[in-house]
Image (cartoon, rainbow, N blue to C red):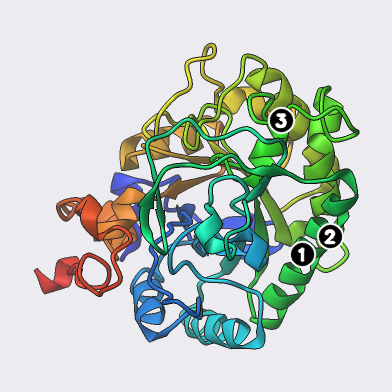
Amino acid sequence: MDSSSLKNFAPHLLSPFDLRGLPLRNRVVMAPLTRGRSGHDRIPNDLMLEYYTQRASAGLIIAEATTISEQGFGWVDSPGIINDAQVAGWGNITAALHTRGTPFFLQLWHCGRASHSSFHAGQPAVSASAVKINGDYIHTPVGKQPYETPRALETEEVSAVVEDYRRAAERAKAAGFDGVEIHAANGYLINQFLDSRSNQRTDCYGGSVENRYRFLKEVIEAVLTVWPANRVAVRLSPNGCFNDMGAPDFREIHTYAAAQLNAYGLAYLHVVDGLAFGFHEQGKPMTLPEFRAVFAGPLMGNCGYTRESAEAAIASGEADLVAFGRPYLSNPDLVERFANNWELNPPAEMKDWSAPTAQGYTDFPSHSQT
C-alpha cells in the first residue's frame, strides 16, 4: 500500500505505533479468534500456519485462546501450550510471521466452568464457585451437552493454577512469541473470579473487589517472572454477557482492576468495549474513556468496530489500537482493504467458524485474487 492510500482513508488507524518498544506498522490488531483447527492433539499445524500468515499485514496478531493446562480445556480441538510438540507447532507459526515482520502475542486461556466433564475424564470442570452457566448447551468431545455445575477450586488449589499460567508463559517464550495476553474476559476462569455473579466465595478470593481481583493479580505477577511487563497484556470484557457474565457491580470491579493493572507498565490493556457480542444490561455500558481515566498505558478497543469507528477512536485518543475479529475471518488482507477502500468479502458463515476444515478458514480470497 502507498502513503496516499493511508492518508486518504484511515491515516490514524494505519499509522505506525510504538508498543512499549515493539514497533507496529499499523494499529490494526487481529483479535484472538477461537477456530478449532488444531485437532485432538491440540498441536498448531500447517493449516493454522497458512491462516495466520495470510493475515500478516496486521500491525499485531493475537493468537487464538490457547489452553495453559489440561484442566483448562473446554473447547473442542483448540490449541494448547502444554507440551513440547505444541511449543514446536506454535514455533513454526511465530517464525513464519516474523519473516513477514509481524509481532505475535499468545493469549493464555483457562476455560473454567465454560467446560464439561467429558473434557476431564468425567470429573467436573473447576471455577471460582459451584455456579452453573445459565445456557442451553456446550459443544463437547461427545457432542452437544447441557452445562454442568462446576467444582469450586479449594483455596489451596489456586496457587497450582497460577503456576500453570507461569509455565505456559515460559513455553510461549520458547515458542518465539513476542509477548502474552492474559485472558481475563468472556466468562472464562479469571473472569469467573472477577464477576460476583459467578464468584460466591468467602475466602481471600471472594467478596470484595480487592479479593475478586486477587487471582488475576497473582497470575500477572507469576507471568511477570517470565516476561517483562512491556510484553504482558490483559484482556477484559466489562460489558459482556457471554458465558453468563454480568453483575450489578461490573463497573466497580473493572475500574478497580484497570487501575491496579496501570501500575505494572503492561504492553496494553485490551478492552472488549463494543456490544456486538452481547450486553448484560446491568447498567450503562463501560466505555474506553472510563478506562483511559485509570489506565495510562496503551489501550486497545474491540468488538463491532468498522474502519470508520476505529479511525475515529484513535484520532480522538480514546484508543491506541483497535482489534478486529469477525472482519478478519473472511478478509485475510483486511489492512489492505482498509487502506484502499476496497469492499470487504461477505462474512464467514457461523457453521465454519470452528469447523475442522479449510473451508471458511483459509479459502477467502484477497482483493488481488477477486
What residue does disc 1 label? 164
Mark 1 vs mark 2, CA separation in Å: 6 Å
Q: Where is 233 relative to 255, above or below?
A: below
Location of residue 368 by image quarter: bottom left
Mark 2 vs mark 3, CA separation in Å: 19 Å
Mark 3 vs mark 1, CA separation in Å: 21 Å
Location of the N terminus (image quadrant) = bottom left
Please tell me which residue is depicted at 30% across the width and 71% down the height of the picture. Answer: 356
**Residue at far front of view:** 122
Q: Position of residue 294 (x, y in %)?
A: 74, 28
- Which of label 3 and label 1 is nearer to you? 3
State the residue in front, 112 or 109.
112
**Residue at far left of view:** 370
Q: Where is 76 relative to 266, above or below?
A: below
Say what amino acid the circle numbered 1 marks.
Answer: Asp
What residue does disc 3 label? 199
Say what amino acid the circle numbered 3 marks.
Answer: Asn
State the residue in front, 323 or 41.
41
Labelled pair 3, 1 in contact (Cβ < 8 Å): no
Labelled pair 1, 2 in contact (Cβ < 8 Å): yes
Q: How many marks?
A: 3
Q: Earlier in the sequence, mark 3 or mark 1?
A: 1
The crowding category of the residue bearing disc 1, from other C-alpha atoms within 10 Å (few below 14, some 14 to 19, many at least 20), is many
